[in-house]
Image (cartoon, grey):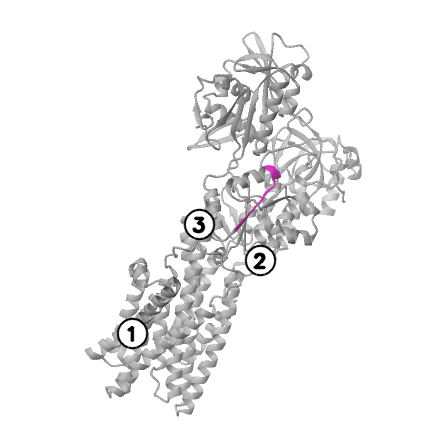
């Protein structure tokens, strides 16, 4: 059963089309029949991924497959040490990835939780309580303050002041007043459908009856669920690059190893010996430690991020943050405090600024930044009394945090009054409540009547242009006089001035009566009023956001605001925090719909603010940036943000105000809802990626050196400088711990001042590849020099020469690891002990290498001999040469940069 655009239909038409009654609702039998025909009011849940599937997914990587094959071959060749080392590396990598992803992909289950458990329904003329999942189209339901709306419904009747909080769907920070009035426009945004209530939203005030028009996946919430389910999460840039890079490395290694094998056979080596050497060299050449080191580096980075209020849910998404070039941010609650705050008031002919932000009742009053006392301006209190008594909200304090119970706008008025030292509980000892006429969208006014001793006072608040028309007197500094055209012009001018600053302005007035008429007439109460003043409020930006946005600009990151709020409000906030420049554009959702695809593609890069947008709009914006080759981070807290958050390269949810839906589809949760924490996470992401590149550089340059040693010796016709067991040991000792030490290197000082890198930038650039090959060649030359010197110059045995080569090859790599901390800065400037973990890792590796040639048992295993004191001096000298050579190269680079 379908109904099109119920907001443009009369209530009777809606009921007729749904075969329901506005008095008795559905017949019980009809409700039961429809439930069987159309199913439960539940969102479809995606097929859950089993823990086993998550675990096995960790092995879906080319290098992992090669490593498993290498482990099997090593086992067959009776090389248990290497086989166990490879298995351990693969297992650690899988375990860490599994732990991070175990709780992922629960988005639709979280959406399901948004349904309220029970609903008040009228069926066959009887009011009854049924499970919300059993609601069907045509049901007549009752709603009141505190209820969560269970389906998309057309309002059939509502009290004055009936309002729902739709921030989770629309991003609109203020409650939306609802009524049963028919809307003229068919194509109207969800935020402006004031006769509709939606599943997943909450009733904040008043009562209403509504007829169910859409359930389950046909609701707006269901549409969002469908969008989330249809979004496939792509691999991160790092995953793509490592996959491609790994394949290239493995192929290159196999070619070189095959050449060494063939040359060895041509030189007269035995088939078994050369096969063992080839396998050992293949295992040594393939950077099998890379997946585990990348995973561990990411895990350690994640731990650091937690301390900076960023909780990463998907491990490899950390790197995506590091190359973020665009951050699309929700406004309400992310860039702003989501706490309406009175910032200005006009009374007695003076415009006052109000200090403080949020719901904290501390703050003062200022004229041109100069503080003023209430003794000097006592008429401020009269305005505050009006605001406080014409109010249904309250302010509470718990654990040092202040919270508004009720409408956020009214809460802002209470906080402003508290800054003047006034509390409603104290005033009500003097003023006795009599009657209230709630706000409604027709009058745009709210009136509350109190008795003070023998007289009655009506306090009124509402829209300034409406209220002024009902005023005949103005209270000017405690003295009343007839309201003239000059007064009206000044009030309206101040109102326009405050509105241009994106503030919401309310006007206040009162009227005194000696006695109340028996029949209270609204037109009588709200006529011949005495105007008191204006109060203007705004949802203020977070204190630290401006600094964070400036840091983004310096880092080459584009920031875009996407909000459900009004365009003027959004632009004003964007200007204040630095989102909006002189050449920036702002678009509303309606303007966005009116743009053709080509027009949008021309404009979107200059648009800094999108206002009054739907979830579909947000998704379109994120897709446009991604299609342009940018790496997009999307932040959000509401259900309406969830599809775009999932579509983005890195989805960021708010931890405090964020809905379960958004958190579950996100890659990262900001635990303090602080935009600055996102920027801190970007900084960490850049540092982590730099460290991964350092690890790759170190591993590949060392592995290149190992291959070149064997290849060059075979080419020259020398005996093999290293035995298979020696190659495997070097690979085990030098690849693991030192590379991990590099993985925790402190971030470079300029990490947030250089431009954001492109997502398609290779892990190893051409320049870096040339440098790695040169460094590998230098390591090979040093090793072959030691081998030749002991074998030919000293005329020692082949075992002794291999011992020298064995130590030099491992120790050159331990010296070389310090080169890899920076390709430009001297290690002596960086400081050896600015990364103590690396120093400890190198010392442990060095001690293990010394043990391999010093302990009698190890000498037998590794087929080595003890070296003389002169040989040890020679080994240390030759092993340190890569460090000094790289320091000379860095001096050359710096001299060229200063020329």
Q: Which residue is mark 3?
A: 680
Residue 245 against residue 266 in the figure, above or below: above
The image quadrant of residue 561 is top right
Q: Position of residue 576 (x, y in %)?
A: 52, 39
- The secondary element bearing badge 3 is classed as helix
Most extreme residue toward the front is: 899
Q: Are circles 1 and 3 on residues that touch, CB within 8 Å?
A: no
Q: Residues within 10 Å of mark 2 (few under 14, many from 20)?
A: few
Q: Which-is-in-front pick, marks 3 and 2?
A: 3
Residue 354's tag is none
Other-residue count near label 3 (Cα within 10 Å), few / some / many at <14 / 14–19 / ≥20: some
Q: Which residue is mark 2?
A: 233
The residue to which callout 1 is attached is 879
Q: Mark 1 or mark 2: which is in front? A: 1
Which of the two discs, 3 and 2, labels the residue nearer the N terminus? Answer: 2
Q: Residue at x 52, y 67 (%)?
A: 60
Region rendered in magenta: 558-568
């Amino acid at each position: 059963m379908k109904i099109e655009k119920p907001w443009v239909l009369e209530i009777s038409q809606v009921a007729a089309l749904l075969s329901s009654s506005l008095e008795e609702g559905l017949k019980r039998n009809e409700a039961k029949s429809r439930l069987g025909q159309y199913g439960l009011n539940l969102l479809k849940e995606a097929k859950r991924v089993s823990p086993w599937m998550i675990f096995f997914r960790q092995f879906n990587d080319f290098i992992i497959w090669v490593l498993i094959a290498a482990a099997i071959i090593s086992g067959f060749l009776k090389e248990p040490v290497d086989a166990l080392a490879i298995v351990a590396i693969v297992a650690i990598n899988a375990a860490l990835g599994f732990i991070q992803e175990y709780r992922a992909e629960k988005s639709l289950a979280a959406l399901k939780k948004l349904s309220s458990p029970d609903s008040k329904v009228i069926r066959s003329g009887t009011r009854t309580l049924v499970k919300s999942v059993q609601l069907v189209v045509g049901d007549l339901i009752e709603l009141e303050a505190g209820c969560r709306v269970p389906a998309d419904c057309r309002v059939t009747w509502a009290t004055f002041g009936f309002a729902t909080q739709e921030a989770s769907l629309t991003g609109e920070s203020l409650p939306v007043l609802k009524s049963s009035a028919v809307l003229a426009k068919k194509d109207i945004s969800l935020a402006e459908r004031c006769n509709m209530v939606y599943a997943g939203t909450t009733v904040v005030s008043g009562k209403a009856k509504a007829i169910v028009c859409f359930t389950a996946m046909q609701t707006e919430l269901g549409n969002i669920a469908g969008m989330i389910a249809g979004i496939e999460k792509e691999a991160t840039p790092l995953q793509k690059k490592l996959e491609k890079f790994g394949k290239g490395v493995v192929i290159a290694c196999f070619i070189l190893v095959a050449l060494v094998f063939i040359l060895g056979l041509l030189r007269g080596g035995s088939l078994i010996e050369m096969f063992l050497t080839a396998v050992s060299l293949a295992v040594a050449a393939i950077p099998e430690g890379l997946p585990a080191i990348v995973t561990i580096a990411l895990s350690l980075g994640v731990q650091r991020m937690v301390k900076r209020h960023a909780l990463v849910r998907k491990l490899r998404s950390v790197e995506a943050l590091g190359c973020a070039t665009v951050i699309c941010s929700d406004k309400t609650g992310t860039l702003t405090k989501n706490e309406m705050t009175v910032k200005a008031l006009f009374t007695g002919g003076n415009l006052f600024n109000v200090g403080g932000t949020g719901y904290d009742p501390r703050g003062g009053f200022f004229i041109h930044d100069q503080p003023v006392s209430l003794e000097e301006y006592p008429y401020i209190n009269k305005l505050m009394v009006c605001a406080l008594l014409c109010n249904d909200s309250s302010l509470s304090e718990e654990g040092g945090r202040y919270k508004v119970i009720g409408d956020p706008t009214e809460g802002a008025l209470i906080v402003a009054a508290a800054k003047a030292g006034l509390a409603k509980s104290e005033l009500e000892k003097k003023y006795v409540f009599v009657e209230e006429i709630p706000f409604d969208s027709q009058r745009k006014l709210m009136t509350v009547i109190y008795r003070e001793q023998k007289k009655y006072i009506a306090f009124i608040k509402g829209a300034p242009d409406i209220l002024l028309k009902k005023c005949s007197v103005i209270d000017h500094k405690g003295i009343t006089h007839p309201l003239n055209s000059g007064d009206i012009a000044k009030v309206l001018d101040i109102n326009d001035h405050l509105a241009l600053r994106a503030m919401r302005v309310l006007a206040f007035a009162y009227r005194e009566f000696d006695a109340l008429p028996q029949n209270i007439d609204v037109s009588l109460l709200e006529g011949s009023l005495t105007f008191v003043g204006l109060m203007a409020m705004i949802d203020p930006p977070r204190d630290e956001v401006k600094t964070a946005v400036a840091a983004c600009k310096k880092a080459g990151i584009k920031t875009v605001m996407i909000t459900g709020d009004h365009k003027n409000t959004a632009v004003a906030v964007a200007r204040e925090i630095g989102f909006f420049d002189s050449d920036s554009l702002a678009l509303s959702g309606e303007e966005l719909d009116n743009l053709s695809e080509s027009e949008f593609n021309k404009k979107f890069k200059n648009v800094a603010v999108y206002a009054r947008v739907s979830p579909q709009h947000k998704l379109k914006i994120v897709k446009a940036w991604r299609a342009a080759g940018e790496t997009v981070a999307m932040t959000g807290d509401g259900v309406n943000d969830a599809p775009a958050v999932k579509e983005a390269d890195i989805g960021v949810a708010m931890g405090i105000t964020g809905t379960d839906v958004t958190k579950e589809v996100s890659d990262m949760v900001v635990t303090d809802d602080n935009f600055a924490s996102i920027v801190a996470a970007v900084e960490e992401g850049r540092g982590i990626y730099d460290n991964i590149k350092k690890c790759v550089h170190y591993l590949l340059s060392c592995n290149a050196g190992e291959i070149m040693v064997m290849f060059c010796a075979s080419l020259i016709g020398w005996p093999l400088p290293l035995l298979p067991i020696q190659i495997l040991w070097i690979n085990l000792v030098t690849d693991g711990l030192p590379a991990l030490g590099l993985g925790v290197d402190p971030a470079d000082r300029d990490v947030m001042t250089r431009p954001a890198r492109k997502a398609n930038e290779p892990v190893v650039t051409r320049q870096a590849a040339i440098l790695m090959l040169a460094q590998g060649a230098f390591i090979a030359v040093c090793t072959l020099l030691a081998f030749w010197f002991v074998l030919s110059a000293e005329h020692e045995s082949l075992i002794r020469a291999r011992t020298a080569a064995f130590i030099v090859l491992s120790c050159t790599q331990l010296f070389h690891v310090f080169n890899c901390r920076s390709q430009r800065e001297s290690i002596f400037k960086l400081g050896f002990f600015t990364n103590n973990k690396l120093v400890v890792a190198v010392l442990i590796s060095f001690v293990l290498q010394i043990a391999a040639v010093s302990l009698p048992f190890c000498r037998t295993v590794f087929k080595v001999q003890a070296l003389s004191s002169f040989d040890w001096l020679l080994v240390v000298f030759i092993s340190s040469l890569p460090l000094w050579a790289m320091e000379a190269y860095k001096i050359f680079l710096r001299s060229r940069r200063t020329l």
